[in-house]
Each structure stands twice: as C-alpha cells, then as structure tokens.
Image: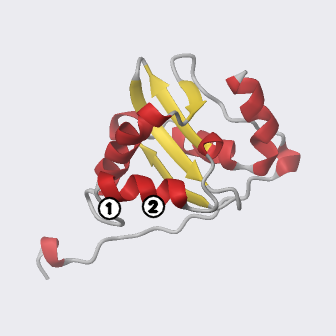
Amino acid sequence: MAKHDEPAKVWRMRAELDPASGREPDWPRQIRVRTLAPADAEAVHSLLAHGCRGGGGSVTPFEAWLPEMTADDEFDSELWFLAESRAMLVGVALCWSSAFVKNVVVRESWRRRGHGEALLRMCSPSSRRVVHQLLS
C-alpha cells in the first residue's frame, strides 16, 4: 500500500486527572491563557484545521463550523481555552459543558513542552477554580 493510501492513525487518549493530585496547569511565563472571544473564532478554526491536515480528523469550512459549534447545547465560550504567546495562538482546548473535551490542538513548534496536558487540565472540573484565578 502506498503511503498516501494508508489509513490515518487516530489515537484515543484517556488521562486520569485526579482532583486529589492537586496538580494545576503549569504554564511558562510567556504563555497567556484565556477563554474565547468572538474575534478569536477564525484563528481557532485555522489552528484546528492545521492540526487535522495530516489526517486523524477534519474540520468543516469556517462558515459551517462556527454556527455548528456555537449552536450546540453544550457550547460555552468560557470552556474554550486559548493559550497564546505574543498574540500567536499556541494551542486550544475546546470543552463542552458536559465535561467532554471536543478538541485539543497545540501548534507543532510548541509541542512536547507540556502545553497539551496543561490545556487538558484546564478542562478538568477540578481545575475550574484555577481557571477563574488565572483569568481574574
């Protein structure tokens, strides 16, 4: 089978985010974490599409994606976490109100530094109090 005909690899990840561990997201100084603002939607979509370009998922065109996301009963812009450095989007975690993590994407040049795990910890119900502290 030629390389382009091979099926894409998809990983399902399950992580225990034990509230008893007390471990909070660990962000370097140059990373700022905040929640979604309406002006962020295109940049978030672009990063998601970039993350899916090698297979393992897809993102509908922006014009369809945004209404699909924001019309979902479980959508809450306060649960979409954006990590950025100097106005560049480094990573995102899109969480639903049911505690389902829809997407986690980290820009390749920022990977292998713990940012994906930190974004997942932002989604953890045990981290909600930390979220409010970080964003205050």
Q: Is residue 107 visible?
A: no
Horizontal placement of 47 versus 68: left or right? Answer: left
Q: Which mark is residue 68?
A: 2
Image x and y of residue 89, in percent: 41, 31
Residue 130 in which image quadrant = top right
Q: Is residue 8 visible?
A: yes
Residue 29 in which image quadrant = top right
Name which residue lies at 63% across and 49% down. Answer: 76
Above-or-below relation of 3 to 48: below
Tell me how many marks there are.
2
The kind of residue tagged 1 is Thr
The kind of residue tagged 2 is Glu
Which quarter of the figure is the N terminus placed in?
Answer: bottom left
Few, some or many C-alpha atoms within 10 Å of disc 2 (few <14, some 14-19, many ≥20)? Answer: few
Q: Which residue is mark 1?
A: 60
Nearest to N terminus: mark 2 or mark 1: 1
Q: Which mark is residue 10?
A: none
Above-or-below relation of 99 to 120: below
Residue 9 in which image quadrant = bottom left
* Viewer-side residue, 3 vs 121: 121
Image x and y of residue 85, in percent: 45, 22
* Viewer-side residue, 97 vs 100: 97
Name which residue lies at 29% across and 48% down. Answer: 50
* Viewer-side residue, 41 vs 93: 41
Whole-angstrom CA distance, mark 2 to mark 1, is 9 Å
Above-or-below relation of 28 to 60: above
Q: Secondary structure at mark 2?
A: helix
Tell me how the rendering is colored: secondary structure
For the residues labelled 2 and 1, say whether their Cβ atoms are less than 8 Å apart.
Answer: yes
Outermost residue, left direction?
Answer: 2
